[in-house]
Amino acid sequence: MIRKKAATKTPVRVKQKTHAGQVQALAARLLRVQEEERRRVSRELHDQICQQLASLAIEISGLAADPPPPERAQKVLRELQRRVIMVSEATRHIAYELHPSVLDDLGLVASLRGVCKKFSEEEGVPVEFRSGLLPPEIPREAASCLYRVVQESLRNVARHASASKVSVWLRMKKNAVALTIADDGSGFDPAEARGRGGLGLVGMAERARLVRGRLSISTRKGRGTRVLVEVPLQAVVA
């Protein structure tokens, strides 16, 4: 009896298994990040909003039962007003982190220009923002993706890059909106970043994937970093 020679794994199958393992690891990390984000928002709502509102309700109830003398009433009311404003600002901040309303109010270009200006003022790193001719309306999902990628990229620059300048360029590239963020900082090893978790990079890639876009990162230690994301508008609309 002649035994058939066992089939060996082809390189294609090995690559497929490797890719599947990477996707599973990515999905697991994203689930952990999402759960951590939910816990963070829950803590902020409980600690900053619920507790302060409960404290205000108790104080207002006490004032209703025992009003202060006229000479103190104005001071007490002003203090309550100050605390209500603080709670309102904290609520607005949490809502903004969940969805930047500035995108709906000002549009993508003005919103990105504002993010770049704020980063430059806070970090002391000049940011050149350029925008080419864009469609009059960009789908909300695409705009949100591009906005968050700029936010995360600038955070990475502030934390790790030690850059002296940054450029942000938004334009059309065939049927896609293309966004480039480049800095002249220290760069990094992508493999090392993935080994440490690289959740910021993972989050940007996942955002691009959800709108059927593509994100690529070009970087070398000591040579700066270039982030490119392309979002096909037809795919988003479809």
Image (cartoon, rainbow, N blue to C red):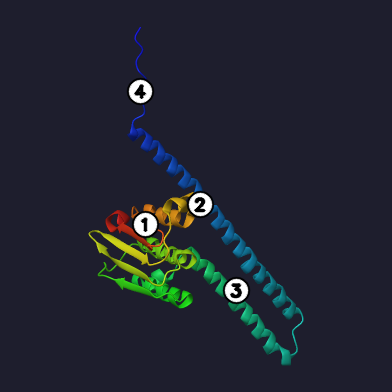
Q: Position of residue 115 (x, y in %)?
A: 42, 72
Where is mark 2, residue-wise?
Answer: 196
Find the distance from the CA under tag 4 to the CA under tag 3: 67 Å
Residue that extends furthest to the bottom in the rendered view of this protein: 71
Q: Earlier in the sequence, mark 1 or mark 2?
A: 2
Q: Secondary structure at mark 3?
A: helix
> How many C-alpha atoms fall within 10 Å of the one at disc 3: few (<14), some, or many (≥20)?
some
Compare residues 87 and 222 and report the one nearer the observer: 222
Q: Are marks 4 and 3 in contact (CB under 8 Å)?
A: no
Find the distance from the CA under tag 4 to the CA under tag 1: 38 Å
Find the distance from the CA under tag 2 to the CA under tag 3: 37 Å
Give the label, 4 or 3, closer to the camera.
Answer: 4
Q: Position of residue 77 (x, y in %)?
A: 66, 84
Residue type beneath disc 1: Ile
Q: Secondary structure at mark 2?
A: loop
Q: Residue at x 58, y 60 (%)?
A: 40
Residue type beneath disc 2: Arg
Q: Residue at x 40, y 75 (%)?
A: 126
Residue type beneath disc 4: Ala
Q: Earlier in the sequence, mark 4 or mark 1?
A: 4
The circle drawn on residue 217 is: 1
If the image is split into quadrants, where does the N terminus sit? top left
Q: Earlier in the sequence, mark 4 or mark 3?
A: 4
Residue type beneath disc 3: Val
Q: Secondary structure at mark 4?
A: loop
Q: Residue at x 60, y 73 (%)?
A: 87
Where is mark 4, residue-wise?
Answer: 7
> How many C-alpha atoms fall within 10 Å of the one at disc 1: few (<14), some, or many (≥20)?
some
> How many C-alpha atoms fall within 10 Å of the one at disc 2: few (<14), some, or many (≥20)?
few
Q: Earlier in the sequence, mark 2 or mark 4?
A: 4
Where is mark 3, residue-wise?
Answer: 87
